Image (spheres, rainbow, N blue to C red):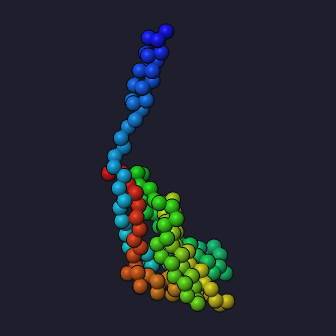
Amino acid sequence: MKFMIALIAIAFAINVQASDKKLGNVIAVERTVENVYATCVDQMQKDREHNPADRYYICKLDVAATSSDSTPGGQRILTVRSPDCTIDTELKDSKVLLMVNGNAAKANFASAKACLKTAMDQNGDTLKFVIFTIE
């Protein structure tokens, strides 16, 4: 009986050890998205065609280069608050979500575009963020 228990324990230990697999080293990498203004204005223009009276625009930028890339959720990249508009940029689900919202009563596509232009001029038309990848 003791022999059977010992065999079962050894078989279980071998089975558990065999299921462990090293995937690689997880490293944090700083990525940069360039030409943000032109890309986002194109997406905002398409949104405007579907909803011309909208004052709120969202731009999605895909940032995962490989399937092993993952993003730490809720990473804020850029936040702009002004009397005319608000810009919030967040990294979520391997995408950068850039949200532009006009604050004024007469906010429109032109004011949202101007606000985005000002923010991107200050930021060098790039967004930098950290992702995790397997080496």
Can see residue 46? Answer: no
- In the rendered structure, the answer to whether residue 102 lies left or right of residue 89 reads right
Q: Quadrant of residue 35?
A: bottom left
The image position of residue 61, as x and y in percent, is 47, 67
The image position of residue 72, as x and y in percent, is 47, 60
- In the rendered structure, the answer to whether residue 106 lies left or right of residue 4 reads right
Q: Residue at x 40, y 81 (%)?
A: 123
Q: Residue at x 38, y 54 (%)?
A: 133
Residue placed farthest to the top in the image? 1
Q: Residue at x 51, y 78 (%)?
A: 79
The image position of residue 117, as x and y in percent, is 47, 85
Front residue of 104/28: it is 28
Residue 79 vs 15, above or below: the answer is below
The image position of residue 46, as x and y in percent, is 56, 73
Residue 85 vs 65, above or below: the answer is below
Q: Residue at x 60, y 84 (%)?
A: 102
- In the rendered structure, the answer to whether residue 30 lies left or right of residue 78 reads left
Can see residue 126? Answer: yes
Q: Quadrant of residue 131?
A: bottom left
All told, the count of numbered labels is 0
